[in-house]
């Protein structure tokens, strides 16, 4: 699949990654090669093969429904840039 | 032109687990901000989610209750988007292999007819935190206590055709999840939230119209109002030559309208992919059987049993099965008094009236089911008459007595059925009412039936309400007619 720079820009925006013009053209090549490999995989006959959700051949372990965590707010908030009244403060988001 | 409304609902039900879906932090409501947000909920580097077995069990119980297929394997996916109340940058959800497959729910409409609404699927996911936009000097405050709270999102097929049907569906879901005890169903605290998909099409047309999704609908009443507004908006738009655009709208209960939400371009590109931190969930048949055996009797089954076995009307059966608390109260009253119809009448009449007046829920009723059942038993065995029963009820309500029998004893309300005593009272009333007796004698025979009411009233008064009204009636008629 031929990737264009606009695709890279869009993916970078969705992932909130700052990408310079130089990097963008580099990513077009890198990601195109990855997509080529995917194309190659897709040419395989997978008729009757269930899609793989996880590479490990194991199933999810479950935990008992118990409260095991204690309040560590002060510790966690030490690395936050801004807090007030116990809330994390972030630049204003308005819908 | 005649229009038809097409509605589908996505209901988010907060599951009543003690801890979060992927962490051991508490889900209790109302804690100080961020005191119940642990490293996993905050999405700190290096943490791993571990799935809560109770969240899985609750989701499966719901699935079994709506006759859904429960696939052997379900998978968690990441739904990627950026918002500060979602610190990981993705919501762990289930897109391709949800835990609950297709099922259906029976709803009851105002005229007591029922309709089957199909459920497309239901999936487990985590809730996000809360953003507070006021009072932070131009900043937004984030409380992540709610982040990671388990939600079951129940997605219906577009099977509803009116706002009333949508509200009835929401009520049916509410009563199923509260019967199962998998959610407290408290809409005011956000334990049940609902997104509504609405479109209109010319009646008879098969293809669906373009739909709008209304967010933020969090009460039964709002569902009806939001849909009513939206349907009218869409019809007007089309009739004026416009086109409905597919968009997300917000319901504003204060203005009673829906408004378009400013949606950013690409906002809906969630780039779902299987969550590598969670393995597929595999449920075997023994597990499903175990949960199936523990299911309580569900609202639809209760309704049917109330009608078919207890002989209640469709209306009574519907009202009494609407909530588990109401149903359990009624069944206890019935068990104690042995008469389903009387139990139904008292629970829906005297008791519900008193509860409504004081804005109490049935769990907080000052009169217990045991007390009410005993009271009804005393009416059925003719210990007291209907009028005295209301006094006894009032006394029990006010806490003046432990039991119906105690109140009857204390207030001397035991019904007088002794013919001699009643006759003595009748004789006295007749002796004291010469004018009324003369009137009775002089009136047309067919009007006398009505006039007897005066005498009945006087005798009942003389007995302080304790005389048996049927006996009073019969004896009075005999004595008055003897005077003719």
Image (spheres, rainbow, N blue to C red):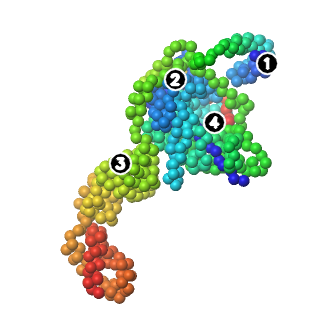
* CA gap, disc 3 and disc 2: 39 Å
The tag on residue B133 is: 4
* CA gap, disc 4 and disc 1: 39 Å
Rate crowding at label 1 as few (under 14), some (14 to 19) or many (20 or more) other CA atoms within 10 Å: some
User: Residue B338 at x, y = what percent?
Assistant: 30, 53
Can residue B88 be seen in the rendering of this structure?
no
Report the chain holding disc 3.
B
Q: How many marks?
A: 4
Quadrant of the rendered structure where residue B218 is? top right
**Residue identifier under label 2:** B73
- SS for tag 1? loop
Instruction: Single out the mark in the foreground, 3 or 2.
Output: 2
- SS for tag 2? strand
Same-chain status of marks 4 and 3: yes
User: Does the residue at mark 2 contact the one at mark 4 (Cβ under 8 Å)?
Assistant: no
User: Does the residue at mark 2 contact the one at mark 1 (Cβ under 8 Å)?
Assistant: no
Return the disc, 3 or 2, that comes first in the chain's sequence.
Answer: 2
User: Residue A88 at x, y = what percent?
Assistant: 59, 28
User: Residue B379 at x, y = what percent?
Assistant: 29, 60
Return the disc, 2 or 4, that comes first in the chain's sequence.
Answer: 2
- SS for tag 4? loop
Rate crowding at label 2 as few (under 14), some (14 to 19) or many (20 or more) other CA atoms within 10 Å: some
* CA gap, disc 4 and disc 3: 48 Å
**Residue identifier under label 3:** B331
The tag on residue A4 is: 1
Q: Which residue is located at x 56 percent, y 16 percent? A: A54
User: Does the residue at mark 3 contact the one at mark 1 (Cβ under 8 Å)?
Assistant: no
Whether residue B177 is situated above or below residue A54 in the rendered picture: below
């Amino acid at each position: 699949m031929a990737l264009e720079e606009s695709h890279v820009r869009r993916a970078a925006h969705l992932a909130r990654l700052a990408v310079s013009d130089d990097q963008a053209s580099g990513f077009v090549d890198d990601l195109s090669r990855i997509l080529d490999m995917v194309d190659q995989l897709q040419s395989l006959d997978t008729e009757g093969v269930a899609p793989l959700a996880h590479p490990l051949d194991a199933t999810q372990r479950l935990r008992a429904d118990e409260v095991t965590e204690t309040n560590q707010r002060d510790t966690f908030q030490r690395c936050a840039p801004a807090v007030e009244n116990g809330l994390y403060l972030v630049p204003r988001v308005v819908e | 032109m005649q229009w038809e409304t097409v509605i589908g609902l996505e209901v988010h039900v907060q599951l009543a687990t003690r801890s979060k879906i992927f962490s051991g932090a508490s889900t209790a409501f109302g804690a100080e901000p961020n005191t119940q947000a642990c490293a996993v909920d905050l999405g700190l580097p290096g943490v791993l989610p571990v799935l809560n077995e109770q969240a899985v069990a609750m989701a499966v119980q719901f699935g079994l209750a709506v006759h859904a297929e429960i696939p052997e394997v379900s998978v968690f996916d990441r739904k990627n988007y950026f918002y500060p109340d979602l610190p990981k940058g993705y919501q762990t959800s289930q897109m391709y292999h949800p835990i609950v497959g297709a099922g259906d729910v029976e709803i009851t409409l105002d005229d007591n007819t029922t309709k089957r609404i199909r459920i497309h699927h239901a999936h487990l996911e985590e809730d996000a935190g809360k953003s507070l936009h006021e009072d932070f000097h131009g900043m937004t405050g984030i409380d992540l206590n709610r982040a990671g709270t388990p939600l079951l999102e129940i997605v219906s097929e577009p099977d509803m055709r009116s706002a009333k049907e949508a509200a009835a569906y929401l009520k049916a879901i509410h009563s199923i999840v509260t019967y199962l005890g998998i959610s407290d169903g408290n809409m005011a605290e956000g334990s049940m939230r609902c997104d509504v998909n609405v479109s209109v099409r010319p009646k008879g047309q098969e293809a669906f119209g373009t739909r709008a999704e209304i967010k933020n609908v969090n009460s039964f009443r709002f569902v009806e109002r939001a849909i009513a507004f939206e349907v009218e908006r869409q019809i007007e738009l089309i009739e004026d030559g416009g086109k409905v655009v597919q968009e997300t709208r917000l319901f504003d209960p204060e203005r009673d309208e829906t408004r378009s939400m400013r949606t950013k371009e690409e906002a809906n590109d969630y780039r779902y992919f299987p969550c590598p931190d969670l393995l597929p969930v595999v449920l075997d048949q023994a597990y499903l059987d175990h949960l199936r055996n523990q299911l309580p009797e569900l609202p639809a089954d209760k309704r049917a049993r109330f009608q078919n076995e207890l002989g209640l009307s469709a209306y009574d059966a519907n009202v009494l099965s609407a909530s588990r608390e109401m149903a359990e109260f009624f069944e206890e009253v019935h068990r104690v008094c042995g008469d389903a119809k009387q139990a139904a009448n008292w629970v829906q009449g005297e008791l519900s009236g008193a509860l409504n007046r004081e804005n109490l829920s049935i769990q907080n009723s000052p009169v217990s089911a045991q007390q009410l059942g005993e009271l009804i038993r005393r009416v059925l065995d003719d210990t007291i008459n209907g009028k005295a029963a209301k006094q006894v009820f009032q006394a029990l309500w006010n806490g003046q007595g432990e039991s119906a029998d105690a109140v009857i004893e204390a207030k001397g309300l035991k019904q007088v059925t002794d013919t001699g005593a009643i006759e003595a009272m009748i004789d006295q009333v007749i002796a004291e009412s010469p004018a009324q007796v003369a009137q009775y004698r002089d009136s047309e025979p067919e009007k006398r039936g009505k006039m007897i009411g005066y005498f009945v009233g006087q005798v009942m008064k003389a007995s302080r309400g304790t005389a048996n009204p049927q006996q009073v009636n019969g004896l009075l008629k005999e004595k008055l007619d003897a005077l003719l």
